[in-house]
Image (cartoon, rainbow, N blue to C red):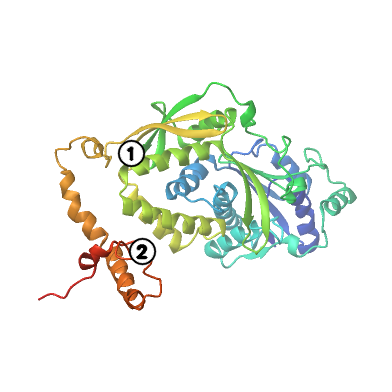
Amino acid sequence: MKIVLGYSGGLDTTVIVPWLRENYRADVICMAADVGQRGGVEKLAGKAFATGASGFFGEDLKEEFVSEYAMPVLRAGAVYSRKYLLGTAMARPLISRRMVEVARRTGAHALAHGCTGKGNDQLRFEVSFTALAPDLRVIAPWREWDIRSREDALAYARARGISLEGIDVEKLYSRDENLWHISHEGGPLENPGNAAGPDVFVWTRDPADAPDTPLEIEIGFEAGFPVTIDGRALSAPDLLMELNQAGSEHGVGRADVIEDRVVGIKSRGVYETPGGTILLTALQELEQLVLSRRCLALKDTLAPRYADLVYEGLWWTPEREALDAMVDTMMKHVTGTVRLRLFKGQATVVARQAPASLYDLDLASFGASEGYEHSDSSGFVKLFSLPQRAIAAQQFAARAPARANGDGSGEMGAEADGATGVPADSRRRLIPTASP
């Protein structure tokens, strides 16, 4: 039996290799994805073979990750739990697809992952596996073995003489890192009453310690894709890395989130997404300039649904393809530049311009406009307020018997109705009359 294991080189996947060999009598092929985490995958082959792996694939997926996964999520405006920019969730369908490709290439019979039974990642991987390779068996050791803690995993490794070099056996936080973000969970963060201390953050400066001089940066977009910084054309990964550096220096992109896992558990995650925060802020400002009010409302309606499907692992679905097609249509003319100021943890808009801007300076001006007469609005205001006028008239008429009986409800007498404040001499104008 051959099993392809999604391999990170951390404690869990390190012990999963010998566990699969012992319990499934399997050849274990490790697949490690470089999506921009520190250290990459170059040093993982030796570790995998040392624990008994029979094969190793180290995949550089950074370009694909940013261009084909992070950018569609950005253009959709997808944000989960109001603040989470989905850095971990968006990487899982890519890694899953590559695992399936390796399984096909090597003739493997099963796919394995190191996700726990409490988290979201088990769902993201396994739903992707089902969509891409329903014929392959899925093995989730955390749902089968008797290892229940980090201490148990360490004991398992030591009993088999497995080297733990390069593994932080005392680590306090569980972290996931790629080009889009770095996440932090566990340890003191499990108590939402505990503040995230300075030892949590890896990328970003504390905003209080950020430079006292702001940085202005201009981002250029084509059809909603970011393509330039200050006029310089960059590849998607290089552009994101440059924004990560600038945002981190100025403390931009921190988020402390109480989120609802798909399995029904509330959990806490602390995220650093400097480049992604800058890009989302800039893109939304450009959209305000180019998209109509109804298109903006539609996009704001769809964005949470897109976020849910990414979070829940439903990337490989017709729903996501349909939403992408709709986003493509709406973003067709979202081309232009946005200048932002980075300062003390904030990214704020300074200026924006677009060839397809719907902003008409003549119409927007408080002064005289060639194509707009102020008097033209009288009829519009009257028609727009017609439902409110009808409601007020109905309420006034309903209170007429009480006023006639003198029970005090007409306390304002002939001057106004007490409930609506409608002047009595306006009754004829408010109460609709039948057409002749």
Q: Left or right: 138 with respect to 307? A: right
Question: Which kind of residue does numbered mark 1 sit on?
Answer: Thr
Residue 46 in view of the camera: yes
Label 1 sits on residue: 335
Q: Residue furthest right?
A: 159
Residue 195, position as x, y percentages in the image: 72, 42
Q: Using the image as rendered, state which of residue 76 and residue 321 is in the foreground.
A: 76
Q: Left or right: 306 with respect to 144? A: left
Compared to residue 190, the image places residue 223 above or below, namely above
Q: What's the residue at 15%, 41% (across, down)?
A: 371
Crowd band around label 1 with a 10 angstrom C-alpha radius: few (<14), some (14–19), many (20+): many
Give the Cα distance between marks 2 and 1.
Answer: 59 Å
Residue 249, position as x, y percentages in the image: 59, 27
Question: Which kind of residue does numbered mark 2 sit on?
Answer: Met
Label 2 sits on residue: 412
Q: What's the residue at 78%, 41% (across, down)?
A: 167
Q: Left or right: 87 with respect to 357? A: right
Compared to residue 261, the image places residue 333 above or below, namely above
* Of pointers 2 and 1, the one earlier in the residue sequence: 1
Q: Which mark lies nearer to you, 2 or 1? A: 2
Quarter assignment of residue 136:
bottom right
Q: Quadrant of the C terminus?
A: bottom left
Q: What's the residue at 50%, 34% (across, down)?
A: 347
Compared to residue 294, the image places residue 45 above or below, namely above
Q: Left or right: 72 with respect to 266? A: left
Q: Using the image as rendered, state which of residue 418 and residue 331 is in the foreground.
A: 418
